[in-house]
Image (cartoon, rainbow, N blue to C red):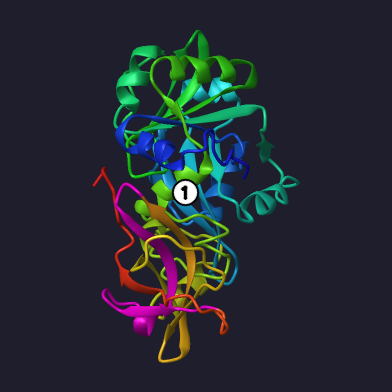
Amino acid sequence: MFVPANYTSDINAEHFAIRTNAGLTDMTGINKVFLSGIESFEFLNHTVTRDLSTVKPGNAVYTVLLNNIGKVIDDAIVFHLDDQAKTSFKAEWLICLGAGLGLEYMQKQVQKQGLNIRHDDNIVCLLLQGPRATTIILPLLTFLHSDAPQRFQHKLARIGGYLALVSRTSYSGEDGFEIFVGKEAAAKIWFLLISKGAIPVGFDALNIARIEAGLLFFGQDMTGNETPTELGLNFVVDFDDHSFRGKKACLENWGKPEIKAVGIIFESEVFELEEKGLVINGKVRGRIQSYARSGWLKKTIGIAHIDTKYATDGQRFLVAQDNGDAKSPIYATVCSRRFYNQLL
């Protein structure tokens, strides 16, 4: 997934825009898959861990994809398009995938009878999030048949004269909206939002915000080797009357996680890590997956995978460093990974 790293040299200004104003990010690099056909529901429902029969048209749900041995190979937001959106996008489902193997797996299913998969790079995704997101965007939207969407809902609307799918989803712990629109309209909508007060925000600032909110990023906090339980994602797995890929292995691994994805707070403020091992009594018992300096929280925070025996709040670790390194030791302490979440 490609997202510009930054728009200015001041990462804190971009990060604070998400927390105090409205940050605008071009998320077009995410993998967007439109799915239709007589077998689309059956295929998709087997592909993800959420039971999509409970997701009504116009709603969306966060979920994960497993392999046959019950490990998370990608995460996704699945949109069940309503009648208007189905007509506009010529599809029943929109799946926005992470940076894992989900797209590759789905593309291999193209040959299935009655299944139409379209990986669409011509649709731009603009993410607007922050406490002023609602006041900036809602006056610009004309919804075709209803009012503004609630959290994890999506509706068709016109913005700047262009038709767009507007979803109330974000990636920071703040309220926000994703705008799915054709390339020809995206630049005009981008500058329209900026003219109303939105501030361009790159991935570096977005990364700080999502770590603060305890949200996982595939390729860092999810590597393809963890189970939902180990990642704290049991809430996205529906077992009752739902058959999904990897279910048997997932059930077998449910009660015996080897690691746990946790939050960590560092005692040092600013540093660069070459080694990411977390050490107790000379032995590595965990690994730092993501970390960042949060100017908003005035803390250096991260997400780590810790051996379950040591994954308890308050557990203190020494951060591994090169043997010849004369720098002062760095310590980190386990905590909840929900450092910040305005939506709770």
Q: Residue 236 placed where, x, y %? A: 40, 56
| Disc 1: CA contacts within 10 A as few (<14), some (14-19) or many (>=20) | many
The residue at the far top in this view is 161
Q: Nearer the viewer, residue 41 or 221?
A: 221
Above or below residue 46? Residue 177 is: above
Tell me, yes or no, if residue 334 can be seen here: yes
- Report how many numbered discs are placed on residues in the image: 1
The residue at the far left in this view is 344
Circle 1 sits on which residue? Answer: 207
Q: Quadrant of the N terminus?
A: top right
Q: Nearer the viewer, residue 271 or 138?
A: 271
State yes or no: residue 312 in magenta: yes
The residue at the far front in this view is 326
**Mark 1 residue element:** helix
Q: Residue at x 69, y 52 (%)?
A: 104
Q: Residue 76 placed where, x, y %? A: 51, 48
Question: Residue 197: which quarter of the image?
Answer: top left
**In the image, 86: left or right of 140?**
right
**In the image, 147: left or right of 52?**
left
State yes or no: residue 211 in magenta: no
Q: Residue at x 54, y 30 (%)?
A: 125
The residue at the far right in this view is 111
Q: Residue at x 35, y 20 (%)?
A: 136
Q: Residue at x 52, y 72 (%)?
A: 276
Q: Residue 71 placed where, x, y %? A: 54, 68
Tell me, yes or no, if residue 239 can be seen here: no
Above or below residue 250? Residue 55 is: above
Q: Residue flagged by tag 1: what amino acid is it?
A: Asn
Q: Residue 160 placed where, x, y %? A: 48, 10
Above or below residue 300? Residue 326 is: below
Q: Which residues are magenta?
A: 295-321
Above or below residue 292? Residue 329 is: below
